[in-house]
Amino acid sequence: MAPPRARFPRRRARRGSVERPVDARLLRAAGLLVALPLLVAAFTVARPAGLPAPALPPVFDQKTALQLAGDLALRYADRSPGSQGALGAAGWFTDQMRLYGFPTEENVFTADVPGRGRVQLRNLVVVVTGDSPQAIVVLAHRDTSGVGVGANDNASGTAALVELARAYSTIGARTGLRARPAHTLIFLSTDGGSYGALGAERFASSSPYRRRVLAVVNLDAIAGHGAPRLELAGDEPRSPAAALVRTAAARVLDETGEEPGRPGALWQLVDLGFPFAPREQGPFVARGIPAVTLTTLGERRGHAFADTAGRLSARRIGQLGRSAESLLGSLDAGLELAQGTSSYVYLDRRIVRGWALELVLLTALLPFLAATVDLFALCRRRRLRLGPAFRAQRSRLAFWAWAGLLVWTGTAVGLFRDGPARPLPPDAAAASTWPLAGLIVLALPLAAGWLLSRERLLPRRPVSVEERLAGYTVALLGLAVVALLVVATNPFALVFVLPSLYAWLWLPQLHGRAAWTRTALFAAGFAGPLLPLLSLAGRYGLGLDAPAYLLSLVTTGYVPWLATVIALAWAAAAGQLGALAVGRYAPYPDEAERPPRGPFREAVRRTVLAVRRHRRATRG
């Protein structure tokens, strides 16, 4: 029996060599900087104070509100924008307000509604003059998506709007005396709420009252059987005044005995990094006007077919109607404590201020930047050629720019959804419609662009360790530029970028490991960028339709064009790192290594030869 062979441990590469280029000590030292912002963030945690409850109890009549909601839903089952039912519902609201002696102002405007074309919409405004010209807005959209009668979403909110106005009318008041508010009150019935809060956007952007508005309370589907919820997200990375949110939560707690639900801390951070607000508070928060939505629907709005008058909850419409009335009274008495918008994340009844979170995210970026610069300095000290790696990265960036140009062109010619820069409600049929025709039409030029770009990127010879390190360094430098652009646009969006930065920073250390190890680490870097898709798929019930919905947000312009460009640049860097991880990377060939014809000329030549061969075969 032969003696066993001695097994010697594999010699570890020297720190600072091309086999072990990432300086872990520098990374750890820079990582200590994150401790201070975390400590600062901990000290900024605050418990916002709510406004006191009004002295008089609410007089909201849930029976009347329930009857009004059922009447609107049965009379005008289809209140979709541009329909006869929408016109009838506008007249119904005007008639109800006239019964209480309130004249109604009508604002007519046109908008492109997905699936319906350019239609005429109507916002209806009732103004109750107060001692101050500064205004508080209570709003509810009265339209439907055209699927179901919309008894809860949102005949219930419209009915509550009428019932809330009754308290300020001498005709409807039980005492015969009209309550004069301290602030001007605006009762706003909007159109187009089921198609991206079009009416709320119109009022927030162009109404003559918009500069006087101090706070907004939106009533959306308040007669469902679900638990009460508050919606806070805006179209920009802002949050409504914490005092407004705390006051709204306290008034709901007073009436229902339960704290209203709201998105968790992680999803609030996602909403700041990727602002998305399908409900009517979004346009107001984006413009610095504190606004909050009261609802019984979750983020998954549910099936419209089941939204009938017989399924309305009298208890819930009464509870949230009285909560809204008490909230209105609190705001009217002490609004100065609830003005403005900021950024923060709610933790139970406490908040972490947005600037502290931004500071933590910015500091968390510094170790990556330091390690990447050190990696670049190592390449320069060893005189590694970075030019071919830069040109390879440029080719990948050109491909993704081509993809972005194709989508822009497809949108311009009508292959992809276009229209107002507003998000469709995720439960709408158009929200889950894949633009298959556009994707098929653009597949050929996209594939042609990929084939042309990859022609110069295919490995034609063994790639040295130094060339791979140059490829890693250039791609990581590209990610550093992407991260700095994110900081300049929306620092909260770093939450989507940081996982890829730190996962992929270690790829150069693993060049000698098994390919599956590098591939797993590369896949881990997608955890951050997938968060917006997971939010749309899970929270809003879009599932596998989330990519199509996200594409519609891009093509309509709801996602800013600069954010799209940054995402494409990130994809280009990810492409180079992916090729390195799976062993398919090659530096851009030198002039001596290139074929006599470029990719375009070679593709034309192959096409011509193929046509000639086909003609010969046909003649023969």
Image (cartoon, helix red, strand yellow):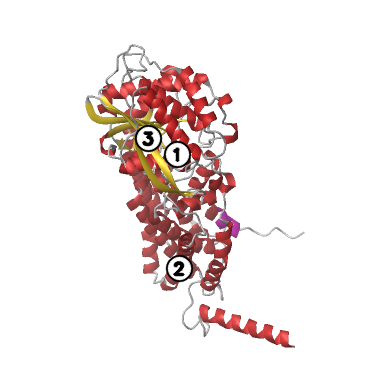
Based on the displayed image, in which of its 4 quarters is residue 206 positioned?
top left
The C terminus: image quadrant:
bottom right
Residue type beneath disc 1: Gly
The amino acid pointed to by label 2 is Ala
Drawn side of residue 275 relative to residue 128, left or right: right
Magenta region, residue range: 515-520
CA separation, marks 1 and 3?
13 Å
The mark tally for this picture is 3
| CB contact under 8 Å: marks 1 and 3 | no
For residue 619, above or below residue 459 = below
Relative height, residue 517 to residue 293 (above, below)? below
* Callout 2 secondary element: helix
- Residue that carries the numbered disc 2 in the rendered image: 398
Q: Residue at x 28, y 32 (%)?
A: 339
Quarter-of-image position of residue 120: top left
Residue 598 drawn at (x, y percent): 50, 80
**210 lies above or below 350:** below
Q: Earlier in the sequence, mark 1 or mark 3?
A: 3
- Characterize the local packing of mark 2: few (<14), some (14-19) or many (20 or more) Cα atoms within 10 angstroms: some
| Labels 2, 1: front one | 1
Q: Residue furthest top?
A: 175
Tag 1's secondary structure? Answer: helix
Mark sitting on residue 124: 3
Residue at the outermost right position? 1
- Viewer-closest of 233 and 332: 332
State the residue position of label 1.
193
Labels 3, 2: front one: 3
